[in-house]
Amino acid sequence: MKITKIQATIAQVPADEPLANGPAEKGATRRFVALKISTDQGLQGIGITFFGGALTGALRVAVEALGELIVGMDPLRIEAIHQKLRAAAGPSGPGGIFTLASSAIDIALWDIKGKAFNKSVCELVGGFRSSVPTYASGALMRHFSLDQVVKAADKLVKKGFKQMKTQLALPGDTNVPKEVERIKRIREAIGDKIDLMCDINQRWDVRQAISIGKQVEKYHLFWLEDVTAFDDYAGLARVAQALDTPVAGGEYVYGSVPFRHMLEARSVDIVMIDLMRSGGITGWLKIAGMAEAFNVPVVSHLVPEIQVHLIAGVPNGLTVEYMPWTFRCYKEVPVPKNGELIVPTKPGLGLEFDPKVVKFS
């Protein structure tokens, strides 16, 4: 089997908050780079990536440029393709646009591999289980009012979510009592049986993380995420050691090597893997295996329609972030039932782009 054609395009969807109908900026959109790889045996694989900024056009060009290099290659030789792309990229790797672009290609190759062997990606990577817990993400954002967040949290419980994530490090005129009160009010709204995670997005320093972290421990957070600078491994380790609440991190990291430093320093209790920044499914699996060697669970960041295969496929997969930003790009996606996602059983990713949203020329 040989790769015959690479097509990339930019898909644009409204930047809404669909989980609890939260406030959204009028006219705001999210842009993704979608990819389709065709083969001489009629099999096609799809991939997706995004930058979340003004460089989406440049990312599409990077996907196309890397894709042209692998036309004529066997799509099942995924590591050989990776090596060729790394060599061609030279000093532009291993992070940044190169990794984001090559990840889209890698995802599409795994989709082809699943279709070639008539297996889901979950089965190919281990097939540990057929369903996996999922948590609602994006409905309890820090820039939403406290009243909005409390109402949204109650809506999520009524929708059947057993896990959800909020944010601290509040914007504007904030202080420690306000931060703590926010967690208190959300916990009161959802009760004690719901897992509540909290993301800081690197906005605290080490001292704040320990101080505020200790004050919210009585509300039994499932984890505190990205409490300080992602590459301050020593600082993160101080926080992880000081708190009873598990510390999660990793979404900002490119490639696998920084995870080794993170794990060796005992910087996190839970490893969070971003599919695009990790180098696609191939890179994701290497990080998950490394975390398993350190007896650490892994969780996903974004693209739950793909990450469900990976978290369900490995033995140390913990839960899937259900943030459905990309869902409008597909005809059909896995949806949560009673707080869990069922792994698609169709070959490959089990996904098909919606041609009304993802338009290839």
Image (cartoon, rainbow, N blue to C red):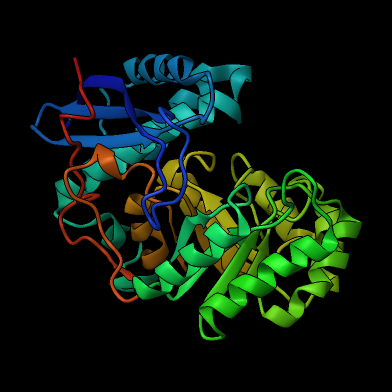
x, y (%) of residue 253? 64, 43
Rendered residue at 46%/40% (across/down): 24
Foreground pick, 134 / 281: 134
Instruction: Identify the residue at the far right of this view.
Output: 207
x, y (%) of residue 281? 41, 47
Q: Is residue 125 above or below residue 221?
A: above
Say which quadrant the N terminus sits in.
top left
Instruction: Identify the residue at the far left of this view.
Output: 42
346 left or right of 212 in image:
left
Foreground pick, 256 / 73: 256
Rendered residue at 11%/26% (across/down): 40
Can I make out residue 188 in this image? yes
Q: Is residue 141 above or below residue 1?
A: below
Can I make out residue 269 in this image? no
x, y (%) of residue 256? 60, 46
Say which quadrant the C terminus sits in.
top left
203 left or right of 321 in image:
right
Q: How many marks?
A: 0
Instruction: Examine the image and state in which quarter residue 135 appears.
Output: bottom left
Foreground pick, 181 / 329: 181
x, y (%) of residue 144? 58, 50
Instruction: Examine the image and state in which quarter residue 146 appears.
Output: bottom right
